Image (cartoon, helix red, strand yellow):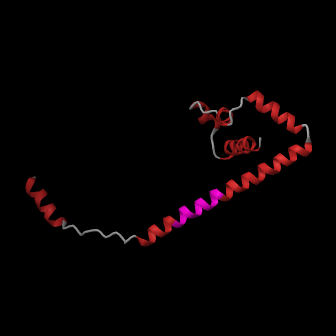
Amino acid sequence: MVEILADAYLGNAARSKSVNNRILRTKGVHLDSILYTKHQVDSLTFAESNNYYASNLDTYTEIITKVENLLMKRKALMDSLGEKKKKKRQDTSANEKPKTFKSVDTSQSETALEEEE
């Protein structure tokens, strides 16, 4: 239950912040269907399980605490991966030699063009 709720929260956050639902729908992407498929449940089973756990506040509070911890771990992992990627880009750009361009003598080109005319 913890995993599916964490994924559901991420999906809802994506929909509200960075993903245009209209574009997803026109492309035939249904985040809820992806969630149910990933966790091998259907919407009714999920709703019934959620209602069951929600009816016991102490149990649901424990689940939500675990969901929050899981989301914080995922965020920490994503942040560390982002930092590694950023550092790699900085290291790569620091090691690159500045690009130099050859000078082109355009006077000969212009003379050749004038002769063709």
Query: 91 or 50, which is in the foreground?
Result: 50
Residue 105 as seen in the image, left or right of residue 46 = left
Residue 21 rendering spot, x and y as whole percentages? 64, 37
Q: Residue furthest left?
A: 115
Total label count? 0
Residue 32 as seen in the image, left or right of residue 93 = right
Give the quarter of the image for residue 55: top right
Residue 84 as seen in the image, left or right of residue 32 = left
Query: 33 or 98, which is in the foreground?
Result: 33
Residue span colored magenta: 77-87
Up/down of 44 relative to 67, above or below: above
Give the quarter of the image for residue 109: bottom left
Residue 64 rendering spot, x and y as whole percentages? 82, 47
x 86%, y 38%: residue: 53
Residue 81 as seen in the image, left or right of residue 60 = left
Give the quarter of the image for residue 72: bottom right
x 58%, y 60%: residue: 82
Residue 61 rendering spot, x and y as whole percentages? 87, 47
Residue 70 rendering spot, x and y as whole percentages? 73, 52
- Give the main secondary structure, helix, strand or loop, of the magenta stretch: helix
Please say whether residue 18 is one of the residues in the magenta stretch.
no
Please say whether residue 83 is one of the residues in the magenta stretch.
yes
x 71%, y 31%: residue: 41
Query: 97 or 115, which is in the foreground?
Result: 97
Query: 94 or 46, which is in the foreground?
Result: 46
x 60%, y 35%: residue: 24
Up/down of 5 relative to 106, above or below: above
On the rendered image, what quadrant is the N terminus found in? top right
